[in-house]
Image: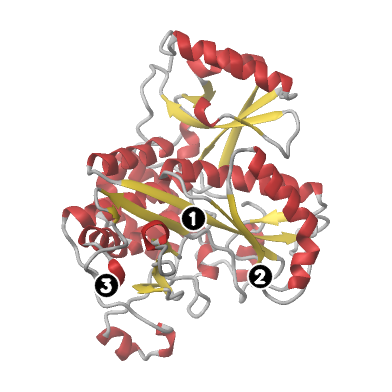
Amino acid sequence: MTGDRIPADERAGLADVLARLRAEGVELVEMSFVDNAGNVRAKSVPLGRLPAVARFGVGASPCFETFTFDDQMVLGRYLGGPDGDLRLVPDLDRLVRLAALPGWAWAPADKFTQDGQRFVACQRAFAARQVRAAADAGLAVLAAFEHEWALGAVDTEEFVPAFTGPAYGQVRLEATADYARELVGALHEQGLEVQQFHPEYALGQVELSVAAKDPLGAADDALLVRHTVRAVSRRHGWRASFAPCLVPGGAGSGAHLHLSVHGADGNLLADGPGRYGLQRAGEAFLAGVLRELPALVAIGSGNPASFLRLEPSRWAGVWQVWGRETREAAVRLITGTTGTEQWAANAEVKCFDATANPYLAVGAVLAAGLAGMREELRLPPEITGDPAALSDDERAAAGIHRLPTNASEAAVALEGSEVLADALGEELHDAICTVRRAEADRFGDVEPDELAALTRWRW
């Protein structure tokens, strides 16, 4: 990170990159990181300073590790307060010109201490560590987030949908056709492979999916997609929101995480002797995720506003259950059509949304799944239909449990998860719990309309 730790050939390669970016009109480079409340923070430097920043980083206070979503600083056992400094070092392998922001390039940043060591609570390093743990177990994991967002008018803090029409309707597609074409083109210019775009269910809502990558790359992609969406939306006179709930009582926006796990025998979610072709190791991985779901909610959808979306019968995944193509289950198994199973079979974690730090989300799910494999866990019976249609007694008899219903319950679950505490390390685990407890305490009694207004334009 510092001094001459960048090899000579990499320095020569960087000179070529700088020349290319200059030729493409780039003048400034943005470096971003995500805090534990899910806010994306950024610093930028002129393009000419990139070589120095790649060697020595650029300063950033560690106070952001314990910032709540509304920028209030709280103190944890290890982190928070006015002291210290970190160095943000851009990952040059992900450096890309921003197609929708002329003159700018972007790279995700890793956090280091001033003596050149990786910062103990770096969320991106946590995700990379879990990817390495999977590789050490002989696994390769592919991941991707679904991106749902709503488009609204720019001249009001309220949410006024940019278009109307039936869910998934052609009327909505016509209203967004030029927008979608520019957005998809910008993402392609930035090296992302778009799988599909379509109008969604909620007011003013659309959805886009990109191709799966390794989990660290998927988290990077999530930042780049959302950044591009907001920029293109502004160019079209709209305002984009990835917030989980814009109007209480209606459907919200999620950020469902899809994963497939591959080993020596191919996709562990296909071609096996188990239910729907699950291999035993694949079943164990999913069982580990299922077990840790209450704690994972604190990471993947632990903002107080997330629970305005996490309601039964809205396909938000509020039940700690799994099922094949069951959209009320928090873990949905997708086997693919006949003949595509080996490359298409994957699992979807449905309870997550865009308030999550995506690096924490992918890393925590990997940690949970790997623990399930080590312990050779087995899945309980699957569910079908909507558990909300059952009585309390029927759900209890079937082992169907509701995931946390508020931010306080989710924080308690994360505090009690030995699997995630061990994977995160005590400093990062404590910082996340500190943030979630503070948000729960401050916003636990806020009325839904006010809470939606407070969070509507933060993501």
Task: Assess disc 3: are there few (<14), some (14-19) or many (≥20) residues with their C-alpha within 10 Å of its C-alpha.
Answer: some
Q: Earlier in the sequence, mark 2 or mark 3?
A: 2
Residue furthest to the front in view is 339
Where residue 26 appears, as percent x and y from the top left, is 71, 24
Where residue 203 appears, as percent x and y from the top left, is 70, 70
Tell me if residue 43 comes above or below residue 417 in the rendering. Answer: above
Q: Is 40 or 304 nearer to us in this picture? A: 40
Q: CA distance from mark 1 to mark 2?
A: 20 Å
Res 160 seen here: no
Q: Amino acid at mark 3?
A: Arg
Number of the front mark, 1 or 3 = 3
Which numbered marker is on residue 385?
A: none
Q: Which residue is mark 2?
A: 247
Where residue 151 appears, as percent x and y from the top left, is 73, 60
Q: Which residue is mark 1?
A: 439
Q: CA distance from mark 1 to mark 3?
A: 40 Å
Q: Which residue is mark 3?
A: 275
Q: Secondary structure at mark 3?
A: helix
Q: Amino acid at mark 2?
A: Val
